[in-house]
Image: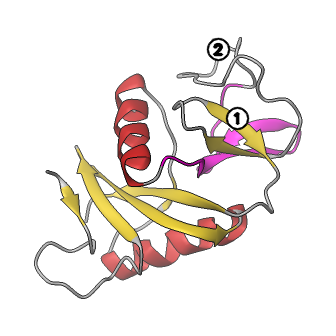
C-alpha cells in the first residue's frame, strides 16, 4: 500500500521512531508522526533527526506545493489520525514562508505564490505556524501548541 511503518522496508529497526510511518510519493519520502507532544520547533527538529537516521538529507516539515501533493499528504495524515498536523509553513519576518525559505501564499486569496489551500478565513492571526486541518485545508496556530506532524525529504 506504499506505507512503510519503520522507514526502512528491508528491516524492522524503527528508524523513524515510535508512532511514525513513512510513505513514498515520486522522489520524496514523507514521514507521518502520530505523536501529540511536539510543538512546531520540536517537530521540525524531529524531522531533521529522522532524516539523518534514514539518510534523507534535508528532511524537514513537509511543504505542500500542488493539489496532488496536498491530496497525498492530507489523505495519509487523516487515515492515521483525524487531527490537525504540523507541516512546514510558518510566519517569519512578516510573511508566510515554507520551511525551505521560499515564499508561500499569504492568505486564502493569494494566487501569486503557488499552490494555496488556506481555509477561507485563514490565517486569522491566532498563531505563526500553519497546521493541516482535518478538512485538508490550512490554518494558523500558536507554534507552542502540541500536534502530530508530517516530515518530507528526498527518498534515500
Badge 2 marks a residue whose secondary structure is loop
Residue drawn 71% across the image and 16% down it: 120
Residue 113, above or below 44: above
Residue 64, above or below 28: above
Crowdedness near tag 2: few (<14), some (14–19) or many (≥20) residues, C-alpha within 10 Å: few
Q: Viewer-proximal residue, 63 or 12? A: 12
| Residue 125 rendering spot, x and y as whole percentages | 89, 35
Which one is in front in this view, the residue at disc 2 or the one at disc 1? 1
Q: Is residue 88 magenta?
A: yes
Cα–Cα span, label 2 and label 1: 19 Å
* Residue 140 location, quadrant: top right
Please state if 105 lies on the left or on the right of 125 as rendered: left
| Residue 103 rendering spot, x and y as whole percentages | 67, 33
Residue 102, above or below 83: above
| Residue 41 rendering spot, x and y as whole percentages | 71, 67
Q: Are marks 2 and 1 in contact (CB under 8 Å)?
A: no
Q: Viewer-proximal residue, 16 or 27? A: 16
Please state if 49 lies on the left or on the right of 133 as rendered: left
* Residue 53 location, quadrant: bottom left
Residue designated by label 1? 139
Instruction: Give the number of marks.
Output: 2
User: Which of the labelled discs sits on residue 58, or is there none?
Assistant: none
Residue designated by label 2? 112
* Residue 74 location, quadrant: top left
| Residue 44 rendering spot, x and y as whole percentages | 61, 65
Q: Specify the quadrant that holds the C terminus.
A: bottom left
Please state if 129 lies on the left or on the right of 154 as rendered: right
Of callouts 2 and 1, which one flags the residue occurring earlier in the amino acid sequence?
A: 2
Residue drawn 65% across the image and 44% down it: 131
* Magenta residues (range): 82-105
Badge 1 marks a residue whose secondary structure is strand
Q: Is residue 19 magenta?
A: no
Amino acid at each position: 500500500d506504499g506505507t512503510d511503518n519503520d522507514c526502512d522496508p528491508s528491516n524492522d529497526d524503527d528508524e523513524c521512531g515510535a508512532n511514525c510511518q513513512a510513505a513514498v510519493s515520486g522522489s520524496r519520502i514523507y514521514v507521518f508522526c502520530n505523536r501529540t507532544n511536539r510543538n512546531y520547533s520540536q517537530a521540525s527538529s524531529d524531522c531533521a533527526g529522522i532524516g539523518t537516521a534514514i539518510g534523507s538529507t534535508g528532511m524537514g516539515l513537509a511543504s505542500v506545493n500542488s493539489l496532488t501533493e496536498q491530496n497525498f499528504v492530507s489523505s495519509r495524515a487523516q487515515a492515521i489520525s483525524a487531527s490537525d498536523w504540523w507541516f512546514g509553513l510558518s510566519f517569519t519576518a512578516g510573511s508566510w514562508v515554507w520551511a525551505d525559505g521560499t515564499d508561500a501564499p499569504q492568505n486564502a486569496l493569494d494566487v501569486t505564490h503557488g499552490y494555496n489551500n488556506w481555509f477561507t478565513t485563514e490565517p486569522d492571526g491566532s498563531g505563526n505556524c500553519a497546521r493541516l486541518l482535518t478538512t485538508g485545508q490550512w490554518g494558523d496556530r500558536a507554534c507552542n501548541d502540541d500536534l502530530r506532524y508530517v516530515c518530507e525529504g528526498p527518498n534515500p
